[in-house]
Amino acid sequence: MRLAQLRASAASSLVNLSKGTTSTRASG
């Protein structure tokens, strides 16, 4: 995996946590 992809994944995870959604959807 590329660092950019990992960072994007981490960012989306933080967004999901902030929204309160525990659904982990792998996009890409």
Image (cartoon, rainbow, N blue to C red):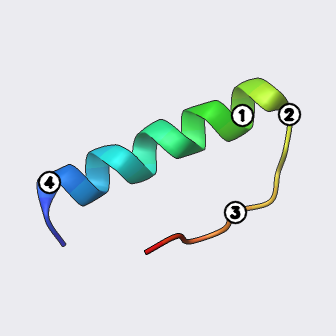
Q: Are marks 1 and 3 in contact (CB under 8 Å)?
A: no
Q: Inspect the image, locate mark 4, and give the three-letter code of the amino acid beneath it.
A: Leu
Tell me residue 20's x, y (percent). 86, 33
* Chain-order first, disc 1 or disc 3: 1
Give the CA distance from mark 1 to mark 2: 5 Å
Q: Secondary structure at mark 3?
A: loop
Q: Quadrant of the N terminus?
A: bottom left
Q: Is residue 6 left or right of residue 19?
A: left
* Chain-order first, disc 3 or disc 4: 4
Q: Inspect the image, locate mark 1, and give the three-letter code of the amino acid beneath it.
A: Leu
Tell me residue 24's x, y (percent). 69, 63
Would you place residue 18 above or below residue 14 in this image? above
Tell me residue 10's x, y (percent). 43, 44
Label 3 neighbourhood size at 10 Å, few (<14), some (14-19), many (20+)? few
Q: Is residue 21 left or right of residue 25?
A: right
Task: Please tell me which residue is depicted at 53% across the width and 43% down the height of the picture.
Answer: 12
* Chain-order first, disc 2 or disc 4: 4
Residue hosting label 1? 17
Which numbered dot is residue 3? Answer: 4
Q: Secondary structure at mark 1?
A: helix
Q: Is residue 27 left or right of residue 7?
A: right
Label 2 neighbourhood size at 10 Å, few (<14), some (14-19), many (20+)? few
* Chain-order first, disc 1 or disc 4: 4
Task: Please tell me which residue is depicted at 84% across the width and 44% down the height of the picture.
Answer: 21
Give the CA distance from mark 3 to mark 2: 11 Å
Label 1 neighbourhood size at 10 Å, few (<14), some (14-19), many (20+)? few
Which numbered dot is residue 24? Answer: 3
Q: Are marks 1 and 2 in contact (CB under 8 Å)?
A: yes
Residue hosting label 2? 20
Q: Is residue 22 left or right of residue 25?
A: right
Q: Are marks 3 and 4 in contact (CB under 8 Å)?
A: no
